[in-house]
Image: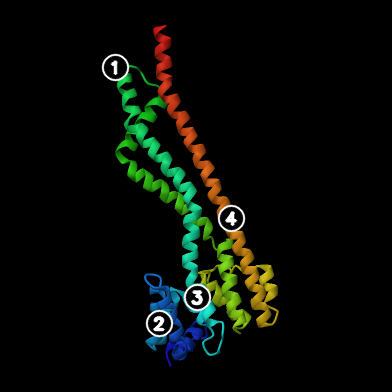
């Protein structure tokens, strides 16, 4: 018996049991991999390869790298008619997350992209003309004008890095908030995984640990599983009833996640518009302040 099967750890035991019952699980995993096609089926082909090897240690390494794909297979030693539903639900999650992510980011990304493009056009058309006017008159430029001219010179020569950096910061901020370990998105995924495990007959304490590992909030890392009060109370119900209630709780957390994401997306958009307005105001002040000074001196 391998070391992975003998260590007293729920995740290791479940992976070892899956390898032991691979003849029952492999057709299911292979069918899902074939249905998902390329490239999304690659995830399930990796699961199939690890299961088919018959090596519990190799399977444990693969499961630790992608625990979410293995949770629907637990417990492997029981016949569960809903196992296909659980695997397909997990297989569709990356597609749903990708579609939601881009739909929510579309508005702020478009605003930032258009603003950057307009600023770039100004920096290569309008600003050089004003710079020549200032140089011809030998004007002493105020600080705000010198700063704006330097910034537009930078934008004119390095607009691509500036744009990429701005979009990366926006996407990084959004993802950091969305995938916070205590955020509604992680709570929804945890509760959904917990529902499947509890309904399949996994003891509640082990189901909590397995679900936490599946969403990357393993207790051993010093993080507390995102177990809400409602989900904790539901664990005292019989497995079948607890699974249904937990699915409903997971749907509620998913609704919260969509609401938070929508609010974030539509908050970033107006903020970006406000920033564009401030930039326009700064450009106006920088361009007309020297002209006003010149007119005043001539008069």
Assess disc 3: are there few (<14), some (14-19) or many (≥20) residues with their C-alpha within 10 Å of its C-alpha.
some
Where residue 43 appears, x then y in whole percent?
A: 41, 74
Among numbered discs 2 and 3, the one appearing first in the sequence: 2
Q: Is residue 145 above or below residue 208?
A: above
Using the image as rendered, state which of residue 243 and residue 175 is in the foreground. Answer: 243
Secondary structure, mark 2, is helix
Among numbered discs 3 and 4, the one appearing first in the sequence: 3
**Residue plotted at (66% across, 71% down):** 231
Where residue 99 appears, x then y in whole percent?
A: 48, 60
Left or right relative to 149: residue 17: right
In the picture of the structure, the residue carrying the numbered disc 4 is 260
Left or right relative to 251: residue 116: left
Cα distance in 3D space between marks 3 and 1: 70 Å
Cα distance in 3D space between marks 1 and 2: 73 Å
Cα distance in 3D space between marks 2 and 3: 15 Å
Q: What mark, if any, has residue 48 been given in the picture? A: 2
Q: Nearer the viewer, mark 1 or mark 2?
A: 2
Which residue occupies the extreme bottom position in the image?
1
**Residue plotted at (65% across, 67% down):** 228
Where residue 155 appears, x then y in whole percent?
A: 34, 37
In the picture of the structure, the residue carrying the numbered disc 3 is 88
């Amino acid at each position: 018996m391998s070391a992975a099967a003998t260590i007293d750890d729920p995740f290791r035991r479940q992976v070892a049991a899956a390898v032991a019952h691979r003849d029952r699980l492999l057709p299911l995993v292979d069918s899902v991999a074939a249905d998902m096609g390329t490239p999304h089926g690659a995830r399930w082909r990796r699961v199939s390869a690890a299961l088919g090897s018959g090596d519990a240690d190799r399977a444990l390494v693969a499961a630790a790298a992608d625990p979410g794909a293995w949770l629907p297979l637990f417990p492997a030693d029981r016949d569960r008619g809903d196992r296909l539903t659980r695997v397909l639900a997990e297989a569709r999650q990356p597609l749903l997350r990708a579609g939601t992510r881009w739909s929510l980011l579309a508005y702020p990304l478009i605003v930032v992209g258009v603003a950057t493009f307009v600023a770039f056009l100004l920096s290569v058309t309008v600003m050089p003309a004003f710079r020549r006017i200032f140089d011809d008159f030998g004007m002493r430029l105020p600080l705000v004008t010198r700063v704006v001219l330097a910034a537009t010179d930078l934008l004119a020569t390095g607009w691509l890095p500036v744009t990429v950096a701005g979009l990366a910061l926006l996407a990084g901020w959004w993802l950091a908030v969305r995938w916070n370990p205590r955020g509604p998105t992680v709570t929804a995924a945890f509760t959904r995984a917990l529902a499947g495990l509890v309904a399949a007959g996994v003891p509640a304490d082990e189901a909590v640990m397995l679900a936490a590992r599946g969403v990357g909030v393993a207790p051993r890392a010093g993080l507390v599983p995102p177990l809400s009060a409602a989900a904790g109370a539901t664990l005292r119900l019989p497995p079948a009833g607890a699974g249904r209630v937990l699915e409903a709780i997971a749907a509620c957390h998913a609704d919260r996640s969509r609401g938070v994401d929508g609010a974030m997306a539509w908050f970033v958009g107006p903020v970006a518009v406000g920033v564009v307005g401030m930039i326009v105001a700064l450009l106006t002040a920088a361009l007309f302040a020297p002209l006003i000074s010149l007119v005043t001196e001539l008069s």
